[in-house]
Amino acid sequence: MRIIGGIAKGSRIFVPAGQNTRPTQERVRESIFNILQREVQGADVLDLFAGSGALGLEAVSRGARYVVSVDHAQESIACIQRSIAKLGFEERMLVMKSDWQRAVWKLRHMHVEFNLVFLDPPYRMSETLAVCEGLAKERLLQRNAVLVIEHRKGLESESSESFILKDIRCYGDTQVSFFEYV
């Protein structure tokens, strides 16, 4: 797997072995970042359920100010850390080994806010709106933050009082929903 744009374009990144992670395909990542062009530059990014870390690494390569990558699997964390070291992104990325609830609690106590969030949970997880609401409740989102949720095609993408669905894109069995925090 490679970084597809920015200062690290073409660089290979490390990917966990096995079937436990589902790295975002290059064509899907390219499409996501083409849609997000203006939002990435200078952004403070949260990459929950990071897996290989490809979305966060891509964001830094394309000019994000800072990225926090969170995953609960040690193999994923090790791959992300190796990729960060290889690309020289140590000053612009933080890696947290944690489930999403504990990560939200820790981040709240760090007093950080994000304007771009990637959520790529396991496809069997259906409560992604609850994750979004948790981020808002803990005041981790800047006003007008963009949330990009990758999920199984056909899973309902519902707006809520706090989140407005702005766009949906489908790529095979993958669906990407773009929300804005209001």
Image: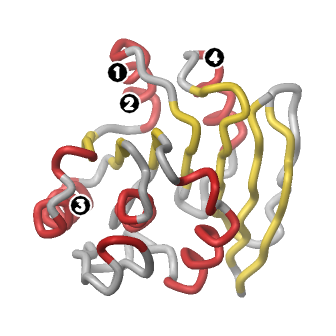
> How many tags in the picture?
4
Residue 32: x and y in percent read 63, 69
Find the distance from the CA under tag 1 to the CA under tag 4: 14 Å
Please name the residue shown 82% across and 65% down the image: 168
Tell me which label, 1 or 4, sits earlier in the chain.
Answer: 1
For badge 3, the amino acid type reads Ile
Residue 138: x and y in percent read 55, 16
- Quadrant in which the C terminus appears: top right
Tell me which label, 4 or 2, sits earlier in the chain.
Answer: 2
- Give residue 103's mark: 2
Find the distance from the CA under tag 4 to the CA under tag 3: 28 Å
Residue nearest the viewer, comparing 33 with 19: 33
Q: Are marks 4 and 2 in contact (CB under 8 Å)?
A: no
Find the distance from the CA under tag 1 to the CA under tag 2: 5 Å
Q: Are marks 1 and 2 in contact (CB under 8 Å)?
A: yes
For badge 4, the amino acid type reads Lys
Determine which residue is flagged by label 1.
106
Quick check: 65 above or below 174?
Answer: above
- Give residue 137's mark: 4
Please name the residue shown 87% across and 46% down the image: 158
Check disc 4 and report its element: helix, strand or loop: helix
- Residue 70 seen from this side: no
Q: Please state if 20 lies on the left or on the right of 156 as rendered.
A: left
